[in-house]
Image: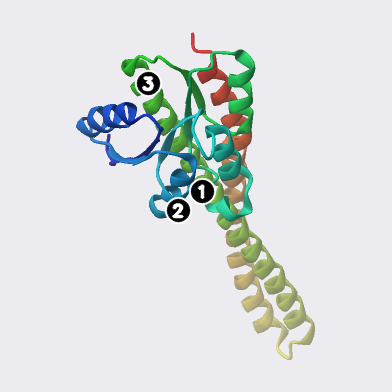
Amino acid sequence: MDEKKRILIVDDEQINLEFFEVMLSKLGFDIHLAENGREALEAVRKLNPDLIILDNIMPKLTGWEVTKILKNDPEYSSFADIPIIMFSALDDVRDKVEGLELGADDYITKPFNFTEVLARIRVVLRTHDLIKQIENREKRIAMAETVLETVTATSTAARKLIDKLNEQANDPAAIQASAKALAEIVDSMDTKVQSLRKEAEGLSELATDLKAIRRKVRVELSHPK
C-alpha cells in the first residue's frame, strides 16, 4: 500500500493479538494492540488509527459498546469516522445487523480465514480513502462556490458604479468610453463566472451523499457474493 496504515487490534485473547501483529506487520501495516474496550478507547485517542479491528465479546467494554461510544459520544466526535471491522463468535444475523447499525463497517464471524480478513481490511481501507477524497472534493466545491459568490457580488457592485459614473459625468463622452471598457471587462468576468459555476454544479452532482455510501458499503460487505 502507498501509505503505511495504522491498525488497532482489540481482543482479549492474546493468541489473536499475536497472530494479527505478526501477519499484518509483515504486510507493511503499523500494528497496535489493546486487550479490552477501555484500553481501545485510550489507544484511539493516542493513535487516531486508520482502522480498528475489534472483538465483540470482551471484558469491561464489549465491542458493541466501544463502537457505540466512538460513533455517538461527543467526546470522541473527532474519531467517529474511523472504520471498524468487528469480530465475533456470534453468527446470528441479528448480531451482525446490530453491529452494522451501530456503525461497524464490517462484521466477521470467528473462526476466520486470514486471506478473507485481509481482503476485507483492504476493501474497508480503500473505501474509507475514497470517502475522504469525496469529502475533500466537497470542501473544494464549497470554497469554489464562495469564490463565485464573491466575484458575482463584485461584478454587481461594479455595474452599479458604472451606472453612477454615467449619470454624474461632466464629460459624458470620456466617461462613457471608460464605462464601456469597464463593462467589457465585467462581461468577460461574468462569462468566466458562469463557466465556473456550471463546472461546480457538475462536481456537486458527482459528490454523492457520504452517509449513503457508507450504508451501501456496509450492506455489500455484510452480504459478500
The residue under the point 51% across, 28% down is 57
Q: Earlier in the sequence, mark 2 or mark 1?
A: 2
Which residue position is annotated with label 3? 117
Q: In the drawing, does residue 207 fall left or right of residue 2?
A: right
**Tag 2–tag 1 contact (CB < 8 Å):** yes
Report the amino acid beneath label 3: Val
Q: Are there few (<14), some (14-19), or many (20+) residues within 10 Å of tag 3? A: some
* Dot in front, 2 or 1: 2
Residue 70 x/y as whole percent = 56, 44
Residue 144 x/y as whole percent = 56, 55
Report the amino acid beneath label 2: Arg
SS state under label 3 = helix
Q: Can residue 149 be seen in this view?
A: yes
17 or 176, which lies in front? 17
Q: Are there few (<14), some (14-19), or many (20+) residues within 10 Å of tag 2? A: few
Report the amino acid beneath label 1: Phe
Query: Taking 74 as reference, is 35 above or below it?
Result: above
115 or 2, which lies in front? 115
The residue under the point 50% across, 35% down is 59
The residue under the point 58% across, 37% down is 65
Which residue position is annotated with label 1? 79
Which residue position is annotated with label 2? 45
* Dot in front, 2 or 3: 2
Query: Taking 119 as reference, is 25 above or below it?
Result: below
SS state under label 1 = helix
